[in-house]
Image (cartoon, helix red, strand yellow):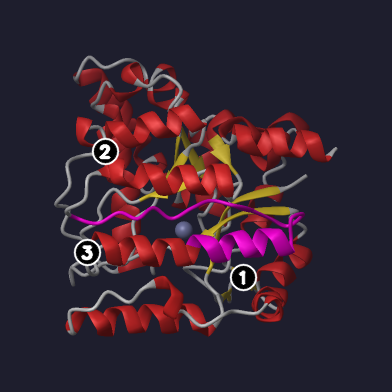
Amino acid sequence: MIIDCHGHYTTAPGALQKFRDEQIAGLKAGVDAPLFTQAKIGDDEIRESLENAQLKLQRARGTDLTIFSPRASAMAHHIGNETTSRRWTEACNDLIQRVVSLYPQNFVGVCQLPQSPAAAPVNSAAELERCVKELGFIGCNLNPDPSGGHWTSPPLTDRHWYPLYEKMVELDVPAMVHVSSSCNANFHATGAHYINADTTAFMQFLTSNLFADFPTLKFIIPHGGGAVPYHWGRYRGLAQDMKRPLLKDYVLKNVFFDTCVYHLPGIELLLKVIPADNIIFGSEMVGAVRGIDPETGQYYDDTKRYVDALGLSEAERYKIFEGNARRVFPRLDARLKTRS
Ligand SMILES: [Zn+2]
């Protein structure tokens, strides 16, 4: 089985964005649009939005199951206040649940959190619990920078975040570290802000005692781990200078990288420096880069091709395409066991 750990509902029916637009317009007038004002979305609209996009690509590329979450760039936790964020988050998560209920073989849900720059992370715990216990989700996307590019929150390793981690541990769900849109003109969202955040999160983990406090807490750093694998010698050297444990004995017990690197040499490097136990197949389709690479004639985000081209052993392939995802998402593993 091939599990894609990183997919977003970037093709959601227009009524979702219409609700968001009304929410944003309402903020200017001092009104927080309530959820019930969102137009009903029909099952056929949902089917149509997926059949020619994510489902078509799953079939064409030979992947089986996508771990699916709301569009990351649209989380935009910096917009409005905590209520704005909560209502928007509920609308997005509820729609993911409907996708999963229509296509339970193809998708499993991961939630957006109702983060907001001034809100304590513990306030996201209730939505996480609702999504896991009531909607059957298996993880969450955690934004380390709800300010959208201004980095006003404490590092992910600060006690500020601990109440949310306690809930993650209790529910046995991991988080993908995933920023959203950038409202800082210095940082292009997908080209700079995303990769910066991936790299930043790893360095925060390296310098902290977070995983001594939470030995079972798990994070996926997407986009191939940002700049980390390419600079692996720097991180090993910094850890050594700081008298930190070896990365393989500390950070890599809890942190995993996906394969959302959009060319073969990048994936070759990833597999060369990061143990196969820490790599989870992901494509982020339909997502950040949608075009066709003129050098290969293939979609940049068809990341399975790059992994296939590596000539991995069966054991390594199993880990990357299935085994590691089942280990990092225990609730997915439990679900798949009941399926078979
Ligand atoms: Zn993403």
**From what the image shows, is residue 316 above or below residue 50?**
above
Q: Name the residue under label 1.
A: 299
Instruction: Please give the name of the residue rendered at 31% of the width and 45% of the height, measured from the top-left corner.
Output: 199
Q: Is residue 192 left or right of residue 272?
A: left
Q: For the residues carrying marks 1 and 2, which lies nearer the camera in this image?
A: 2
Residue segment shown in magenta: 93-117
Mark 1 and mark 2: Cα distance apart in space: 34 Å
Badge 2: residue crowd in 10 Å (few <14, some 14–19, many ≥20): many
Q: Would residue 138 be visible to someone looking at this image?
A: no
Is residue 83 rendered magenta in the image? no
The kind of secondary structure element at disc 2 is loop
Q: Distance between the residues labelled 3 and 2?
A: 21 Å
Q: Distance between the residues labelled 1 and 3?
A: 38 Å
Q: In the rendering, at what x and y percent does residue 126 appear?
A: 39, 44
Q: Earlier in the sequence, mark 1 or mark 2?
A: 2
The residue that mark 3 highlights is: 81
Quarter placement of the C terminus? top right
Lower position in the chain sequence, tag 1 or tag 3: 3
Q: For residue 71, which numbered disc appears in the image?
A: none
- Residue where numbered disc 2 is placed: 156
Residue 97 visible in the current orientation: yes
| Residue 27 appears left or right of 250 | left
Three-letter code, disc 3: Asn
From what the image shows, is residue 181 above or below residue 19?
Answer: above
Where, by quadrant of the figure, is residue 176 drawn? top left
The residue tagged with tag 3: helix, strand or loop? loop
Task: Report the amino acid beneath label 2.
Answer: Leu
Q: What residue type is labelled 1?
A: Tyr
Image position of 157 (left or right of 332): left
Q: In this view, does 122 lie to the left or right of 110?
A: left
